[in-house]
Each structure stands twice: as structure tokens, then as C-alpha cells.
Amino acid sequence: MDYRFKIANREALIGVGLAIFNFIWWFGFAYGLGSKDPSEYTYVFGLPAWFFYSCVLSFIIISILVIIVVKLFFVEVPFEDDEEFKE
């Protein structure tokens, strides 16, 4: 089997893991803090706390995590179909 498939599968699993982490973060804050009565909401920078943490902060954290993961764990693989790349 071509080693590039192993790399692609590993990187795909990392991407799925990041997506699951993002969904859990978003769901936890959106429904955890947002399930209160609106009169009980707290605000961060003029936004309801549930919205700030689930949408704004989540975007910033996931963006940073994606940059770190791509720089540390993703590798460039050649697309040429040479026999020397196959194990």
C-alpha cells in the first residue's frame, strides 16, 4: 500500500477530531449557557456570554488549533505516481 494513503488517513482523522472538538465546544457553550431565561444572561463585549464563547471565542481557538496542527502534524506529500513511493 502506498505510504501516502497512511498520511492522508492520519491527517483526515486529525481533521475529524478538530471538527468534533469544535462541535462539542460550540454545543456546550451555546446550549449550556444559552438555555437560561434571557433576562438572566451575562454579557461579554455586548454579546450574550453563550454567543461570545460558542461563536467568537470558538472561532479564534479553532483557528489557532488548525494553524498549530497543520504546522506540526501535516506533511507535504508528492502527487507523482512513481514506483519508488510504494512500499
Image (cartoon, grey):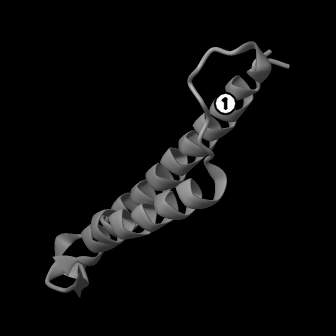
> At x 61% / y 35%, what residue is drawn?
77
Quadrant into which the N terminus falls: top right
- x, y (%) of residue 4? 69, 27
> At x 68% / y 15%, what residue is drawn?
82
Residue 36, located in which quarter of the rendered image? bottom left
Say left or right for 73 vs 34.
right
> At x 28% / y 77%, what residue is drawn?
49
Is 62 situated above or below 52?
above
Residue 16, located in which quarter of the rendered image? top right
- x, y (%) of residue 60? 36, 69
Residue 72, located in which quarter of the rendered image? bottom right
> At x 57% / y 57%, what residue is drawn?
69
Is 45 situated above or below 65?
below
Is 79 situated above or below 83?
below
Quadrant into which the C terminus falls: top right
Please, what is the three-letter code of the amino acid marked with disc 1?
Asn
Is 83 situated above or below 58?
above
For numbered disc 1, what is the local secondary structure? helix
Q: Looking at the image, which is closer to me, 83 or 72? A: 83
- Few, some or many C-alpha atoms within 10 Å of disc 1 (few <14, some 14-19, many ≥20)? few
- Residue that numbered label 1 is attached to: 9
Say left or right for 51 vs 82.
left
Say left or right for 55 vs 39.
right
